[in-house]
Image: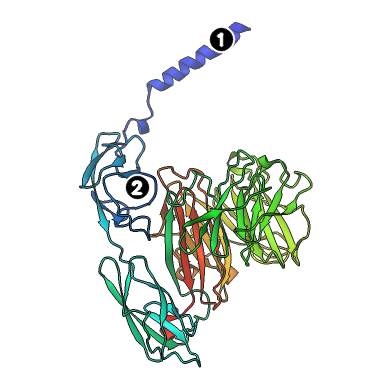
Amino acid sequence: MNKKIIFPLFALLLILLNGCADIDPMFKTKSDKNSMTSLYVTFANGTGGFTATTGEPYDSKLTVEIPWYYPEGSYTETKLDSLFVTATLPNNAIMTPSFGLVNLTSPKTFQLKAQNGDVKEYTITAVRKRSSSKEIKSFKLNESGISGIVVNNTVIIPYTSEDISKQTATVELSYYAKISPDPATVHDYTNPVQYTVTADDGTSVVYTVKMGTPVKVDQGFYSAKKLWFKSAGDMGFDSYRQISIAVSGNYIVLPSSNEWDGGSSAKYYDRKTGNYAGDLNVSGVNGLYAVANDSKGHIVGINNLYAGENVCLFRWDNATSAPKLLARSTDWSCVNSNFYGRKLSVYGDLDGDAVIMSTTDGSGGGAGGPNRILKWVVKGGNIVSPDPEVLVYSKAWGWVAKAVPTGTAATSNYFICSNLPIFMDYLNGSTNTLVSSFSSNYLPAKRDATPALTYFEFNNAKYAAVVDASPYSSAMNIFNITDPSKIGTSSSSGSYSTFRVFSGDSDYILTSADPNLNITGEIAVGPVSADGFTMTVYFLATNGGVAAYELSCIDPTKI
């Protein structure tokens, strides 16, 4: 018996050795790839996040602009003698000298050597730059209490019967900017008043404050403006753990998600600046994994498998409140004992009617899960059942998928978004059958995955905000899906520009020195402003940071 076993093994070894003698021709040629991508520069402590002033493919000479002061809003001057430089290099290529902590007080040249010996030089120059920001962010007449509405370089004072001929004003400006004349002195606002706002770099813009009536576009938003960006280092991210985000009142909430234990922690940040504001109260919450917010800023959280307490939903009335148990399943049958809760979404008001959805890990990609969608319904402020309705989807997804309700009824339509393989399907909530799907060419050039889709409504329009991500960078794109028949629009279609209404092609977030190999990220939306003119969208890139955008439906041509 032993001889019969040894012989085949010996024969197999000879075959393998003979096979190795003749190398496949495709491996005889060494790679000539010597171009880097995703250049990223931070301070030595990991804060900041700066890229080259020119896009990819990079030229041989690159400039990285470092702000004069950092953090933004402080008067702490920056230095260039200790910057941490990273980039994505081709396999088997070697950078000399190596990236890492670099003194860039003067230009520094690096050589990237391909596997075949070909060399490409990159000279990196870092320059300190004073802020060019010169915006009026808010404007308020003090004596009358009337708030102006900023539209481009105009501040509109809504028509009023009050006497505004003798008013002082409180004005919020961009950091480091100055304004002239002084708005704290009395002005007559019954006639237009002009102010010059000067940035720290000396450039200026003239704003006109005048009475008027803002006019909305017929549907949707007219413009999108980035309010701020904070890198992973600025926000104190833990590697891989910031995968979900919620908006509540004046704050955004980001849990530190750890799927390997039952611990819970989360931070909240000022949603107008991105600055750290406090720690979320997680008393009694075991294994908090993902969060989402309803239309009124109530926060919903879900636990993970390792919490060992069946599937639990928790609720916070706001970012500073104590948590309450919203639901606990009676057993594990709803998830089939597989991992769950990587994604969470809610539509509606938890004090009224709402639908909450989560997912289990999928059966594609080796996860071995059952592709389950978990759905809870809230009626009149009460959850209908602690056990979710379980929907088993016909398509297989890999580790991560997100189910997104688009209404407050149990039968409301919903989306299912798969990270890998990529698909984004819109389903009938009554029959759970496919209505339409995003085209495989929904973007002109995709990255690797779609870790999130978020549905929202604004000014009589319906939108799907989608994360397009790779381990090294993530972008947000927004699509107008008011007409569901347009969901399948291809990037080659003549109507594509009215379908993709916000492009992240040139405004992406690079990940830090630690690539986001799990390819995760999320989008959350804040409430529509009281006047109905604006709303804010928050884009989270795991290991990358958070960017905030203001959408405005004011038509600047019709004031």
**Disc nearest the viewer among 2 and 1:** 2
Q: Is residue 501 above or below residue 466?
A: below
Q: Residue at coordinates 59% horizontally, 68% vertically from top-left? A: 484
Q: In the rendered view of the protein, which quadrant contains the N terminus?
A: top right
Residue 523 is left or right of residue 506, and the answer is right
What is the C-alpha distance between the residues marked 2 and 1?
A: 60 Å
Three-letter amino acid code of the residue under disc 1:
Ile
Give the SS element for disc 2: strand
> Residue 441: horizontal and vertical position, in percent?
48, 58
Give the SS element for disc 1: helix
Q: Is residue 389 visible?
A: no
Q: Is residue 155 above or below residue 425?
A: below
Residue 430 is left or right of residue 179, and the answer is right
- Which quarter of the picture shows residue 26? top left
- Residue marked by disc 2: 43
> Residue 268: horizontal and vertical position, in percent?
54, 55
Q: Is residue 279 above or below residue 89?
A: below
> Residue 55: horizontal and vertical position, in percent?
32, 55
Q: Residue at coordinates 45% horizontally, 62% vertically from top-left? A: 273
Q: Please report whichever mark, 2 or 1, sits nearer to the chain's N-terminal start.
A: 1
What colour scheme was applied to this rendering of the protein?
A: rainbow
- Residue marked by disc 1: 6
Q: Residue at coordinates 33% horizontally, 83% vertically from top-left? A: 194
Instruction: Give the number of the disc on residue 552.
Output: none
Three-letter amino acid code of the residue under disc 2:
Phe
> Residue 321: horizontal and vertical position, in percent?
64, 58
Q: Residue at coordinates 34% horizontally, 47% vertically from top-left? A: 43
Q: Is residue 148 above or below residue 15?
A: below
Residue 522 is left or right of residue 408, and the answer is left
Q: In the rendered view of the protein, which quadrant contains the C terminus?
A: bottom left
Residue 271 is left or right of residue 281, and the answer is left
